[in-house]
């Protein structure tokens, strides 16, 4: 995730976000460099070696 290898139990991207504490936060996600819409996260299955990116919005200048 975000360039680091981690072991997870979550079978889907949605469950991964819950597992990592992002469940109700606004984030952008990608799996293997493909953007995943919020509504598709529950159906996005994760397999070994998938590259997941989770991006949180920032404020400031």
Image (spheres, rainbow, N blue to C red):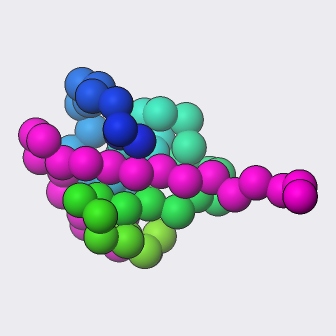
Relative placement, left or right, of 14 versus 55 is left
User: Can you say whether 17 is above or below 57 in the image?
Assistant: above
Q: Is 2 in front, or is 9?
A: 2
Relative placement, left or right, of 6 versus 54 is left
Image quadrant where residue 30 sits: bottom left
How many numbered circles are shown? 0
Residue placed furthest toward the front: 61
Q: Is residue 42 visible?
A: no
Q: Residue, x 44% and y 60% (percent of image)?
A: 29
For the N terminus, the quadrant is: top left
Image quadrant where residue 37 sits: bottom left
Picture coordinates of residue 15 (x, y %)? 36, 46
Asked if the stretch drawn in magenta spans residue 53, the answer is yes
Q: Residue, x 84% and y 56% (percent of image)?
A: 59
Picture coordinates of residue 53 (x, y %)? 40, 51
Residue placed furthest toward the right: 61
First to last magenta residue range: 39-61
Q: Is 36 in front, or is 15?
A: 36
Q: Residue, x 76% and y 54% (percent of image)?
A: 58
Picture coordinates of residue 6 (x, y %)? 29, 26
Prevailing secondary structure class for the magenta stretch in the rendered image = loop
Relative placement, left or right, of 24 versus 34 is right
Asked if the stretch drawn in magenta spans residue 51, the answer is yes
User: Can you say whether 46 is above or below 3 in the image?
Assistant: below
Relative placement, left or right, of 45 versus 14 is left
Picture coordinates of residue 31 (x, y %)? 28, 59
Q: Is residue 59 visible?
A: yes
Q: Is 1 in front, or is 43?
A: 1
Q: Residue, x 47% and y 70% (percent of image)?
A: 38
For the C terminus, the quadrant is: bottom right
User: Can you say whether 61 is above or below 49 in the image?
Assistant: below
């Amino acid at each position: 995730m975000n360039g680091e290898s981690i072991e997870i139990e979550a079978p889907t991207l949605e469950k991964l976000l819950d597992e990592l504490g992002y469940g109700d936060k606004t984030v952008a996600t990608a799996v293997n460099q493909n953007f995943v819409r919020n509504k598709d996260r529950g159906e996005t299955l994760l397999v070994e070696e998938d590259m997941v990116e989770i991006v949180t919005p920032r404020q400031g200048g």
